[in-house]
Amino acid sequence: MAASLTFGRRALPLLALAAAVRPAVAATIDLSLACDTTLAPALRKVAAAYAAKTGVRVFVFPTGPGLLIPQLERNIQNDILVTQLPILQQASDERIIAAVPGAPLWSNPLVIAGRSGASADGVFAACDPTAASDFDGPVLLAKLEMKPAQVMGAVDTDEVAWMLQRGEAQAGFLHMTDVRTHPELTVIRTVPDAVQAPFVYAATVTKLASRPNPQGFVAFLQAPEAGELLKQAGLEAQT
């Protein structure tokens, strides 16, 4: 009996500690956000502004556009999804999100970029049609009737920007958000909407969300402070 009593007394502090720890884990306010790779720098700036106001940290996880849905299908914890409208429609069809949001919406035009004074006639970097990219670079070159001296394939626009920075290519297709991320790069010419319409994005809470108030960050994306940061990053608000 004495041994049992001693064990029970020793167990009490441990049980109390466990009871104290469980609510802390369940009540974590940190949020997880999945987005297209090209949006990550912009959303990290907005997340920093949100953390400064609320104390809530939003961790941004960039993923190739074609890989976002497979990632979420594996129940990888993501509270918020920011991506293109067609991908959001797929997420809605597969019941990963409740519905495609009507707002806020932002557009991100495709451009031909390079270092200042560069020509698009030399070595040209273009994304291959892979799950990591959201456009087919060689097809766009054909539509634009461009015939550069050499075309170098890339996995995504991050790799295109890397080639341009290293001088391995003189020009390449980038999203406007990619250009704004790399100040040493500039727009050589825009891609007409008839060839490639700007990509349009929205933000929503996923059905995988388990942390408190992810909708708060989605709402903050419509605030003037967040809007200015997104505009500086190359995204234009759609009305």
Image (tube, helix red, strand yellow):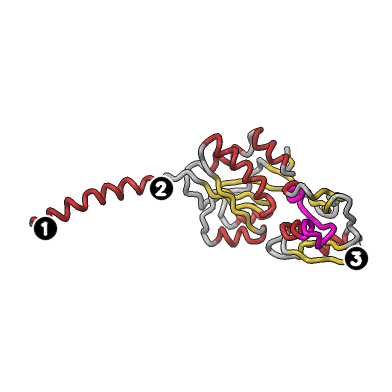
- Which of the two labelled residues, at mark 1 and mark 3, occupies the earlier sequence position? 1
Disc 2 element = helix
The local crowd at label 1, few if under 14, some if 14 to 19, many if 20 or more residues have their Cα within 10 Å, is few
**Residue at the spot 52% in from the left edge and 47% down from the top edge:** 31
Can you say whether 142 is above or below 31 in the image? below
**Segment colored magenta:** 163-179
Q: In the depicted view, which residue is nearer to us: 172 or 106?
A: 172
- Res 64 quadrant in image: bottom right
Q: Is residue 11 left or right of residue 162?
A: left
Q: Which amino acid, mark 2?
A: Ala
Q: Position of residue 197 (x, y in %)?
A: 80, 51
Left or right of 161 on screen, residue 40: left
Q: Secondary structure at mark 1?
A: helix
For the C terminus, the image quarter is top right
Which three-letter amino acid code belongs to the residue tagged 3?
Answer: Ala
Q: Which residue is mark 1?
A: 3
Q: Residues within 10 Å of mark 3 (few under 14, many from 20)?
A: few
